[in-house]
Amino acid sequence: MSIDIDPPFLERTSLSLQHAALAVLDEVAMHPPDTGPSYCLTQQGLADVGDVATALAREVHDVADALDAFLAFARDVDGDVAWVFDVLLSGRLS
Amino acid sequence: MTIETLVAGDPAACDRSARELACLGEATDRATTSVARRSTISTADFGGLSGDSFRRHAGSLAESLSAESGRCHRLARAMGQLAHDLDRVAGLMEQARQTARARRLVVEGTTIVVPGAHADPDQHRAWRELRAVVAGIRELEARAQREWVAALARDTGTAPPARPAQSPARGGLPGLPAPANPSVVTPGPLSSRTPSGAPGLTGVTSPAGPASTPGAETVRHGHLTPAATMAAEPVAETTWAAELVGPHAEPWSPAGTPAYEEMLDEPA
């Protein structure tokens, strides 16, 4: 049993996701501003924004990694992914 | 007694932070577009259970990224507004200090010193006017902080701890809005809050009630004390005080400000 995949297209997809994730991670580091009496709340709020953005970017990166892993198996079977690998790897992509 | 005109906070740093937030928002926007486009790849390009899992996960990630991007942009706008407001407040405080110097008041750093006993009436009058004007500027500052804290609370869930508000007129930093706390006892005469028959507290009489009690108001106005006479004098408007009227400020007058109310309460 085999499933349809387009390895070059999925490679480009993985690269594109990695770039998007890195672009977000590049912008996450923010200088804490002196906002006066709201300083502590501001630090807390900005830390929350940074944490969520980092977590999302890492998740995008993880999906790209999972796609790479999937493609590594796909290359071995020349574009056809055996059903058992599909079942095993779908868990990593979900 | 002095008038403190120091403004806490760095408008330039806030502006830089607003730009950083906007950049993060743009990067997240691009990630959203990228992930959303991949969430609709066809089954011909990526079939099977893995393809379905990928599409589902990418779709959900795109939604989260989109929400995060919106949050970054909203906070960037709010932070930019705070930077603008703090800059404006600092400029108005600088004008207040310049006015104080022009009207022969002593300014030490950011503090306008109260005229001494030998100062002439014009200096006393200038000091009283500036005190009310600075209180008005403090209100703008407090409003700017409240708006920023509200934006933070909306988008990050951070909320200030409950604490008693400080009076800006007394030189303290503007108090942040304290969340309603039903457990806080409403201030009032001590006797009314003392359980009847409590040992050691029986017979404690409260001092005169707060100045806002109707009785105190009547007595104060009935006496025509020097403070009341002083308060009855119209406070001359300065030309630059008109700048207090802006997109975020209603037409402003010293009457009704905490400093003005305090001026009513204090002896001359």
Image (tube, helix red, strand yellow):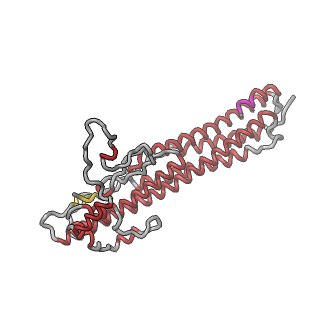
Residue B28 is a magenta residue: no
Task: Out of B202 and A82, give the one closest to the viewer.
Answer: B202
Residue A91 is a magenta residue: yes
Task: Out of A27 and B168, give the one closest to the viewer.
Answer: B168
In this image, B89 relative to A90: left or right?
left
In this image, B60 relative to B130: left or right?
right
In this image, B209 relative to B30: left or right?
left
Residue A48 locus on image (x, y percent) = 52, 42
Residue shown at the point (82%, 27%) measured from the top left: A83
* Image quadrant occupied by the N terminus of chain B: bottom left
Residue shown at the point (34%, 56%) measured from the top left: B7
B223 is higher (above) or lower (below) than A90 = below
Q: Which residues are magenta?
A: A89-93
Residue B146 locus on image (x, y percent) = 44, 54
Residue B67 locus on image (x, y percent) = 62, 48
Task: Out of B114 and B256, give the one closest to the viewer.
Answer: B256
Report if residue B90 is visible in the image: no
A42 is higher (above) or lower (below) than B139 = above
